[in-house]
Image (cartoon, rainbow, N blue to C red):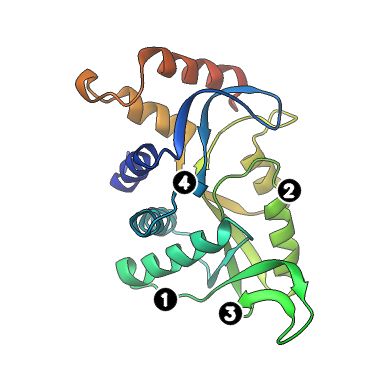
Amino acid sequence: MQQYQLTFIDLALRRDALRFGRFTLKSGRASPYFFNAGCFSDGESAAVLGGCYAAAIVASGLAFDMLFGPAYKGIPLATATAIALATGHGVTVPYAFNRKEAKEHGEGGNIIGAALRGRVLIVDDVITAGTAVRESIELIRDAGAQPVGVALALDREERGQGELSAVQEVEQAHGLRCVSIVTLGDLIEALASQPPERARISDDQLTALRAYRQRYGVR
């Protein structure tokens, strides 16, 4: 487990972005945990989160020329990541994001920031149905640029309609590489390794996480 992964898990728990209990997902599955990146809504969270994304991207060795943040959650994520890459790793890259609806006046269009060109890395929180990523891929390719990967906060490692996870489906269908700060497996490992006096999750909750992964996790 890398330090940036432990830092991310600690931040997610402190900001209540990672919760344990019983949550009904869009798929209809009853999940013992829920992740909401919208809870990273202050300056410290943005700075720390951007640093975790940057560390995961650099560690992956993935080559890219710019970042793209899908509206809406991807916008602050891509911005924070670009800042962290520059200040923490000496890597300065442009970034862009999209509007949900194209602007008809002024400069027009639906892309804000740098022009989409070269190898583009998409920055988002999680992949569930993969809709936002597919839309981003289309925007990037329509601009003549090349989508090369997706940086995520959490990979749920959970099967979709078939035997593959949503992340694996995106990788296979579009030839992209997905880079995650943590996976569900990483999360379980980190929580299970904490001493009892510092436990952030009950034994029952940890058991439920493992059972959920056993039932719905990718093989």
Task: Decide which of tag 2 and tag 1 comes sooner along the chain.
Answer: 1
Amino acid identity at mark 1? Thr
Residue 72 visible somewhere in the drawing: yes
In the image, 87: left or right of 183? left
For disc 4, the marked residue is 39
- The residue sitting at 71% across, 29% down in the picture is 27
Check whether the beta carbons of the residues at disc 3 and disc 2 lie within 8 A of each other.
no
Tell me the element at label 3: loop
| Tag in front: 3 or 4 | 4
> Whole-Å distance between the Cαs marked 2 and 1?
30 Å
For disc 1, the marked residue is 92
Tell me the element at label 4: helix
Amino acid identity at mark 4? Cys
| Tag in front: 2 or 1 | 1
Place of residue 129 in the rendered image (x, y in percent of width and height, measured from the top left) = 71, 41
| Tag in front: 1 or 3 | 3
- The residue sitting at 33% across, 73% down in the picture is 90
| Tag in front: 2 or 4 | 4
For disc 2, the marked residue is 173
For disc 3, the marked residue is 114
> Whole-Å distance between the Cαs marked 1 and 3?
13 Å
The answer to whether residue 100 is above or below residue 93 is above
